[in-house]
Image (cartoon, grey):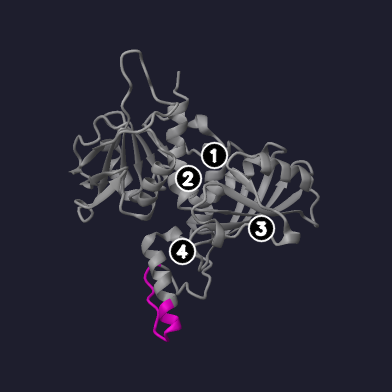
Protein backbone atom coordinates (compact mmCIF):
# COMPACT_ATOMS: atom_id res chain seq x y z
CA UNK A 1 0.00 0.00 0.00
CA UNK A 2 1.32 3.43 -0.93
CA UNK A 3 0.58 6.34 1.40
CA UNK A 4 1.99 9.85 1.35
CA UNK A 5 2.30 10.01 5.11
CA UNK A 6 3.50 6.68 6.49
CA UNK A 7 2.12 5.62 9.88
CA UNK A 8 4.56 3.17 11.34
CA UNK A 9 4.65 0.91 14.35
CA UNK A 10 7.95 1.29 16.22
CA UNK A 11 9.45 0.36 19.55
CA UNK A 12 9.20 3.16 22.06
CA UNK A 13 12.21 5.36 22.64
CA UNK A 14 13.15 6.40 26.20
CA UNK A 15 12.53 10.00 25.22
CA UNK A 16 8.90 9.46 24.24
CA UNK A 17 6.45 11.83 25.87
CA UNK A 18 4.01 9.72 27.81
CA UNK A 19 1.05 10.44 30.08
CA UNK A 20 -1.25 8.11 31.97
CA UNK A 21 -3.93 8.47 29.33
CA UNK A 22 -1.99 8.49 26.07
CA UNK A 23 1.31 8.18 24.32
CA UNK A 24 2.49 11.12 22.27
CA UNK A 25 2.66 10.21 18.57
CA UNK A 26 5.79 11.45 16.86
CA UNK A 27 5.49 12.81 13.33
CA UNK A 28 8.57 13.74 11.34
CA UNK A 29 9.34 14.98 7.84
CA UNK A 30 12.30 14.84 5.46
CA UNK A 31 12.65 17.61 2.89
CA UNK A 32 14.94 16.76 -0.02
CA UNK A 33 14.67 13.02 0.44
CA UNK A 34 15.95 12.10 -3.02
CA UNK A 35 19.40 13.68 -2.52
CA UNK A 36 22.47 12.04 -1.01
CA UNK A 37 21.79 13.46 2.47
CA UNK A 38 18.07 12.77 2.21
CA UNK A 39 18.78 9.13 1.49
CA UNK A 40 21.20 9.06 4.39
CA UNK A 41 18.44 10.40 6.65
CA UNK A 42 16.34 7.34 5.82
CA UNK A 43 19.22 4.99 6.65
CA UNK A 44 20.16 6.78 9.89
CA UNK A 45 16.57 6.91 11.14
CA UNK A 46 16.28 3.17 10.55
CA UNK A 47 19.69 2.29 12.04
CA UNK A 48 18.97 4.24 15.21
CA UNK A 49 15.35 3.12 15.47
CA UNK A 50 14.33 6.76 15.72
CA UNK A 51 10.98 6.86 17.54
CA UNK A 52 8.53 8.15 14.96
CA UNK A 53 5.01 6.98 14.21
CA UNK A 54 4.44 8.96 11.04
CA UNK A 55 6.82 10.06 8.29
CA UNK A 56 6.20 12.56 5.49
CA UNK A 57 8.62 12.85 2.58
CA UNK A 58 8.98 16.01 0.51
CA UNK A 59 10.84 16.84 -2.67
CA UNK A 60 10.76 18.93 -5.79
CA UNK A 61 8.13 18.62 -8.50
CA UNK A 62 10.56 16.31 -10.29
CA UNK A 63 10.86 14.02 -7.25
CA UNK A 64 7.16 14.04 -6.34
CA UNK A 65 5.57 10.63 -6.76
CA UNK A 66 8.74 8.66 -6.11
CA UNK A 67 8.25 5.82 -3.64
CA UNK A 68 10.58 4.81 -0.79
CA UNK A 69 10.06 1.80 1.42
CA UNK A 70 10.46 2.75 5.08
CA UNK A 71 10.14 0.05 7.73
CA UNK A 72 7.97 -2.04 5.43
CA UNK A 73 5.74 0.82 4.29
CA UNK A 74 5.79 2.47 0.87
CA UNK A 75 6.01 6.24 1.27
CA UNK A 76 5.23 8.53 -1.65
CA UNK A 77 7.19 11.78 -1.98
CA UNK A 78 5.01 14.89 -1.88
CA UNK A 79 5.89 18.09 -3.71
CA UNK A 80 7.05 20.79 -1.32
CA UNK A 81 4.54 23.64 -1.48
CA UNK A 82 3.41 26.62 0.58
CA UNK A 83 0.47 25.00 2.37
CA UNK A 84 -0.35 23.30 5.67
CA UNK A 85 1.37 19.96 4.97
CA UNK A 86 3.65 20.46 8.00
CA UNK A 87 0.77 20.73 10.45
CA UNK A 88 1.36 18.18 13.21
CA UNK A 89 5.02 17.61 12.28
CA UNK A 90 7.35 17.59 15.29
CA UNK A 91 10.73 17.57 13.51
CA UNK A 92 11.53 18.41 9.90
CA UNK A 93 14.94 17.34 8.59
CA UNK A 94 15.69 19.68 5.70
CA UNK A 95 18.41 19.14 3.09
CA UNK A 96 17.31 20.77 -0.13
CA UNK A 97 19.72 23.69 -0.46
CA UNK A 98 19.87 27.15 1.06
CA UNK A 99 17.42 28.74 -1.35
CA UNK A 100 14.71 26.21 -0.56
CA UNK A 101 15.38 26.48 3.17
CA UNK A 102 14.99 30.25 3.13
CA UNK A 103 11.87 30.17 0.99
CA UNK A 104 10.05 27.47 2.98
CA UNK A 105 11.28 28.07 6.54
CA UNK A 106 8.09 29.84 7.61
CA UNK A 107 5.90 27.22 5.91
CA UNK A 108 7.76 24.43 7.69
CA UNK A 109 7.77 26.00 11.16
CA UNK A 110 4.49 27.94 11.33
CA UNK A 111 2.57 25.08 12.98
CA UNK A 112 5.32 24.33 15.53
CA UNK A 113 7.66 21.95 13.72
CA UNK A 114 11.32 22.17 14.68
CA UNK A 115 13.24 22.67 11.44
CA UNK A 116 16.72 21.11 11.53
CA UNK A 117 18.36 22.57 8.47
CA UNK A 118 21.40 21.15 6.73
CA UNK A 119 22.10 24.15 4.48
CA UNK A 120 24.23 27.20 5.20
CA UNK A 121 21.20 29.50 5.04
CA UNK A 122 20.86 30.21 8.77
CA UNK A 123 24.12 29.06 10.34
CA UNK A 124 25.44 32.46 11.30
CA UNK A 125 22.08 34.06 12.17
CA UNK A 126 22.16 35.23 15.78
CA UNK A 127 18.68 33.85 16.46
CA UNK A 128 19.40 30.37 15.06
CA UNK A 129 21.49 27.91 17.12
CA UNK A 130 24.29 26.04 15.38
CA UNK A 131 24.52 22.68 17.10
CA UNK A 132 26.81 19.67 17.37
CA UNK A 133 25.34 17.47 20.15
CA UNK A 134 28.73 16.32 21.45
CA UNK A 135 29.79 19.95 21.88
CA UNK A 136 26.88 22.34 22.54
CA UNK A 137 23.60 20.39 22.77
CA UNK A 138 21.79 22.83 25.06
CA UNK A 139 22.08 25.59 22.46
CA UNK A 140 19.25 23.76 20.69
CA UNK A 141 16.81 25.00 23.33
CA UNK A 142 17.33 28.63 22.31
CA UNK A 143 15.53 28.66 18.96
CA UNK A 144 13.13 31.62 18.72
CA UNK A 145 12.41 30.87 15.04
CA UNK A 146 12.12 27.11 15.67
CA UNK A 147 15.08 26.60 13.36
CA UNK A 148 18.26 24.74 14.31
CA UNK A 149 21.16 24.83 11.88
CA UNK A 150 23.37 21.86 11.13
CA UNK A 151 26.98 23.04 10.71
CA UNK A 152 29.20 22.52 7.71
CA UNK A 153 30.40 18.92 7.43
CA UNK A 154 34.08 19.74 7.90
CA UNK A 155 33.31 21.91 10.92
CA UNK A 156 31.26 19.16 12.57
CA UNK A 157 33.96 16.51 12.54
CA UNK A 158 36.64 18.99 13.56
CA UNK A 159 34.80 20.41 16.59
CA UNK A 160 33.94 16.92 17.89
CA UNK A 161 37.70 16.30 18.11
CA UNK A 162 38.51 19.81 19.36
CA UNK A 163 36.00 19.50 22.22
CA UNK A 164 38.08 16.74 23.80
CA UNK A 165 41.18 18.95 23.65
CA UNK A 166 39.35 22.05 24.89
CA UNK A 167 38.38 20.07 28.00
CA UNK A 168 42.10 19.76 28.79
CA UNK A 169 43.25 23.27 27.92
CA UNK A 170 41.77 26.20 26.05
CA UNK A 171 42.58 26.07 22.35
CA UNK A 172 44.08 29.29 21.03
CA UNK A 173 44.31 28.45 17.34
CA UNK A 174 44.02 25.69 14.79
CA UNK A 175 45.57 25.24 11.36
CA UNK A 176 43.48 22.79 9.35
CA UNK A 177 44.12 21.17 5.99
CA UNK A 178 41.12 19.24 4.76
CA UNK A 179 41.01 16.47 2.18
CA UNK A 180 37.38 16.33 1.14
CA UNK A 181 35.78 13.49 -0.77
CA UNK A 182 33.67 13.86 -3.90
CA UNK A 183 30.52 13.01 -1.94
CA UNK A 184 30.75 16.42 -0.28
CA UNK A 185 29.44 17.82 -3.55
CA UNK A 186 26.49 15.40 -3.68
CA UNK A 187 25.42 12.16 -5.31
CA UNK A 188 25.94 13.52 -8.84
CA UNK A 189 29.54 14.38 -7.98
CA UNK A 190 30.18 10.84 -6.78
CA UNK A 191 28.79 9.49 -10.03
CA UNK A 192 30.95 11.93 -12.00
CA UNK A 193 34.10 10.76 -10.23
CA UNK A 194 33.30 7.14 -11.12
CA UNK A 195 32.68 8.16 -14.72
CA UNK A 196 35.86 10.24 -14.92
CA UNK A 197 37.98 7.29 -13.82
CA UNK A 198 36.30 5.08 -16.42
CA UNK A 199 36.76 7.69 -19.14
CA UNK A 200 40.42 8.40 -18.35
CA UNK A 201 41.31 4.70 -18.23
CA UNK A 202 39.47 4.20 -21.53
CA UNK A 203 41.40 7.04 -23.15
CA UNK A 204 38.31 9.24 -23.41
CA UNK A 205 37.92 12.93 -22.60
CA UNK A 206 36.58 13.11 -19.01
CA UNK A 207 33.26 14.77 -18.25
CA UNK A 208 33.73 17.81 -15.98
CA UNK A 209 30.51 19.32 -14.64
CA UNK A 210 30.44 19.18 -10.84
CA UNK A 211 33.99 20.39 -10.19
CA UNK A 212 36.18 23.17 -11.52
CA UNK A 213 38.55 20.58 -13.01
CA UNK A 214 38.82 16.86 -13.54
CA UNK A 215 38.97 15.25 -10.09
CA UNK A 216 40.05 11.74 -11.09
CA UNK A 217 43.83 11.38 -10.60
CA UNK A 218 43.89 14.97 -9.33
CA UNK A 219 43.37 17.20 -6.29
CA UNK A 220 41.65 20.60 -6.46
CA UNK A 221 42.68 23.26 -3.88
CA UNK A 222 39.30 24.98 -3.99
CA UNK A 223 35.96 24.15 -2.38
CA UNK A 224 33.22 26.75 -2.86
CA UNK A 225 33.91 30.25 -4.19
CA UNK A 226 36.73 32.57 -3.18
CA UNK A 227 36.10 35.52 -0.88
CA UNK A 228 37.82 38.91 -0.83
CA UNK A 229 40.46 37.77 1.67
CA UNK A 230 41.66 34.91 -0.55
CA UNK A 231 39.98 32.18 1.50
CA UNK A 232 37.10 30.18 0.07
CA UNK A 233 33.65 30.23 1.65
CA UNK A 234 34.27 26.67 2.86
CA UNK A 235 37.41 27.78 4.68
CA UNK A 236 35.68 30.77 6.25
CA UNK A 237 32.84 28.52 7.42
CA UNK A 238 35.34 26.57 9.48
CA UNK A 239 36.55 29.80 11.11
CA UNK A 240 33.17 31.36 11.85
CA UNK A 241 31.17 28.25 12.68
CA UNK A 242 33.77 26.86 15.07
CA UNK A 243 33.74 30.04 17.13
CA UNK A 244 29.93 30.05 17.31
CA UNK A 245 29.61 26.37 18.23
CA UNK A 246 32.37 26.38 20.85
CA UNK A 247 31.51 29.85 22.24
CA UNK A 248 35.20 30.58 21.96
CA UNK A 249 37.74 33.07 20.66
CA UNK A 250 39.51 30.18 18.93
CA UNK A 251 41.16 31.10 15.63
CA UNK A 252 40.96 28.66 12.72
CA UNK A 253 42.91 28.97 9.49
CA UNK A 254 41.94 26.35 6.92
CA UNK A 255 42.99 25.12 3.50
CA UNK A 256 40.23 22.97 1.95
CA UNK A 257 41.11 20.57 -0.86
CA UNK A 258 38.89 18.29 -2.93
CA UNK A 259 40.47 14.84 -3.35
CA UNK A 260 39.43 11.85 -5.49
CA UNK A 261 38.18 9.78 -2.56
CA UNK A 262 34.55 8.78 -2.87
CA UNK A 263 33.24 9.26 0.65
CA UNK A 264 34.50 10.50 4.05
CA UNK A 265 36.55 13.64 4.68
CA UNK A 266 40.02 13.69 6.23
CA UNK A 267 41.70 16.55 8.09
CA UNK A 268 45.20 17.32 9.26
CA UNK A 269 44.97 19.50 12.37
CA UNK A 270 47.61 21.55 14.14
CA UNK A 271 46.27 22.70 17.50
CA UNK A 272 47.85 25.25 19.84
CA UNK A 273 46.66 25.20 23.45
CA UNK A 274 47.24 27.58 26.35
CA UNK A 275 49.32 25.02 28.24
CA UNK A 276 51.51 22.25 26.90
CA UNK A 277 49.74 18.91 26.59
CA UNK A 278 51.39 15.52 26.50
CA UNK A 279 50.56 12.98 23.83
CA UNK A 280 49.30 10.69 26.59
CA UNK A 281 46.85 13.32 27.84
CA UNK A 282 45.51 13.89 24.37
CA UNK A 283 45.21 10.20 23.60
CA UNK A 284 43.23 9.61 26.79
CA UNK A 285 40.96 12.59 26.09
CA UNK A 286 40.25 11.34 22.56
CA UNK A 287 39.68 7.77 23.75
CA UNK A 288 37.14 8.99 26.31
CA UNK A 289 35.64 11.73 24.12
CA UNK A 290 32.02 11.54 23.02
CA UNK A 291 31.63 10.59 19.38
CA UNK A 292 35.33 9.81 18.97
CA UNK A 293 37.36 6.67 18.29
CA UNK A 294 41.11 6.60 18.93
CA UNK A 295 42.83 4.82 16.02
CA UNK A 296 46.46 5.56 16.67
CA UNK A 297 49.07 2.84 16.49
CA UNK A 298 51.59 4.10 13.91
CA UNK A 299 54.12 1.35 14.55
CA UNK A 300 51.45 -1.08 13.28
CA UNK A 301 50.38 1.30 10.48
CA UNK A 302 47.05 1.84 12.20
CA UNK A 303 45.50 5.25 11.52
CA UNK A 304 42.20 6.50 10.11
CA UNK A 305 41.60 6.32 6.36
CA UNK A 306 38.44 7.09 4.39
CA UNK A 307 38.74 3.81 2.47
CA UNK A 308 37.72 1.87 5.59
CA UNK A 309 35.52 4.36 7.48
CA UNK A 310 32.72 5.29 5.07
CA UNK A 311 29.34 4.70 6.71
CA UNK A 312 30.67 4.87 10.27
CA UNK A 313 29.14 7.12 12.94
CA UNK A 314 32.17 8.36 14.95
CA UNK A 315 35.02 10.67 14.12
CA UNK A 316 38.28 8.70 14.06
CA UNK A 317 41.54 10.22 15.33
CA UNK A 318 45.14 9.13 14.83
CA UNK A 319 48.71 10.33 14.14
CA UNK A 320 48.69 12.23 17.45
CA UNK A 321 52.06 13.82 18.16
CA UNK A 322 53.76 16.84 19.69
CA UNK A 323 54.75 19.73 17.48
CA UNK A 324 58.56 19.69 17.45
CA UNK A 325 58.63 23.47 16.85
CA UNK A 326 56.08 24.62 19.46
CA UNK A 327 55.76 23.21 23.01
CA UNK A 328 52.03 24.08 23.05
CA UNK A 329 51.33 22.46 19.69
CA UNK A 330 49.65 19.11 18.98
CA UNK A 331 49.09 17.51 15.59
CA UNK A 332 46.50 14.91 14.66
CA UNK A 333 44.73 13.34 11.70
CA UNK A 334 40.97 12.84 11.73
CA UNK A 335 38.51 11.10 9.39
CA UNK A 336 34.72 11.19 9.42
CA UNK A 337 31.88 10.32 7.07
CA UNK A 338 30.64 13.75 6.04
CA UNK A 339 27.29 12.50 4.70
CA UNK A 340 26.64 10.70 7.96
CA UNK A 341 28.15 12.52 10.95
CA UNK A 342 28.76 15.58 8.80
CA UNK A 343 25.09 15.87 7.84
CA UNK A 344 22.26 13.39 8.47
CA UNK A 345 23.48 11.77 11.69
CA UNK A 346 24.24 15.09 13.37
CA UNK A 347 20.74 16.37 12.57
CA UNK A 348 19.10 13.21 13.90
CA UNK A 349 21.22 13.38 17.06
CA UNK A 350 19.95 16.92 17.65
CA UNK A 351 16.37 15.68 17.54
CA UNK A 352 17.25 12.71 19.76
CA UNK A 353 18.73 15.07 22.34
CA UNK A 354 15.62 17.24 22.40
CA UNK A 355 13.38 14.19 22.74
CA UNK A 356 15.47 12.65 25.53
CA UNK A 357 15.94 15.98 27.35
CA UNK A 358 12.68 17.93 26.98
CA UNK A 359 12.97 21.54 28.06
CA UNK A 360 11.36 22.16 31.43
213 and 189: which is toward the camera? 189
Gap in Å between the C-alphas at discs 1 and 3?
A: 27 Å
Gap in Å between the C-alphas at discs 4 and 1?
A: 26 Å
Q: Which residue is mark 3?
A: 303
Callout 2 touching callout 1 (CB < 8 Å):
yes
Q: Which residue is mark 4?
A: 182
Say which residue appears at 73% left-offset and 59% top-offset: 298
**Which is in the foreground here, disc 4 or disc 2?**
4
Where are the magenta residues, as a range?
Answer: 198-210
Say which residue appears at 49% left-offset and 53% top-offset: 311
Quadrant in which the C terminus appears: top left
Gap in Å between the C-alphas at discs 3 and 4?
A: 21 Å
**Which is in the foreground here, disc 3 or disc 4?**
3
* Drawn side of residue 263 relative to residue 68, left or right: right
**Which is in the foreground here, disc 2 or disc 3?**
3
Residue 42 x %, y %: 36, 46
Magenta stretch holds residue 203:
yes
Amino acid sequence: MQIAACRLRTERHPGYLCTRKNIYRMKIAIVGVSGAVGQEFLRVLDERNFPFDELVLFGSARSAGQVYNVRGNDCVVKELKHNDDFKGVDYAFVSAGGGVSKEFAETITKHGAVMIDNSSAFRMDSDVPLVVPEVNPTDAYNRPRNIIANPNCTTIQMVVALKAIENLSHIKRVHASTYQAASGAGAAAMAELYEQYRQVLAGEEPTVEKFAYQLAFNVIPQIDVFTDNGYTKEEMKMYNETRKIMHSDIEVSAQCVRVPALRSHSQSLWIETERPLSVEEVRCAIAEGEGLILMDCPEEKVYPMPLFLAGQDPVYVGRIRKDITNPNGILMWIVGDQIKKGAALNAVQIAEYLIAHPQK
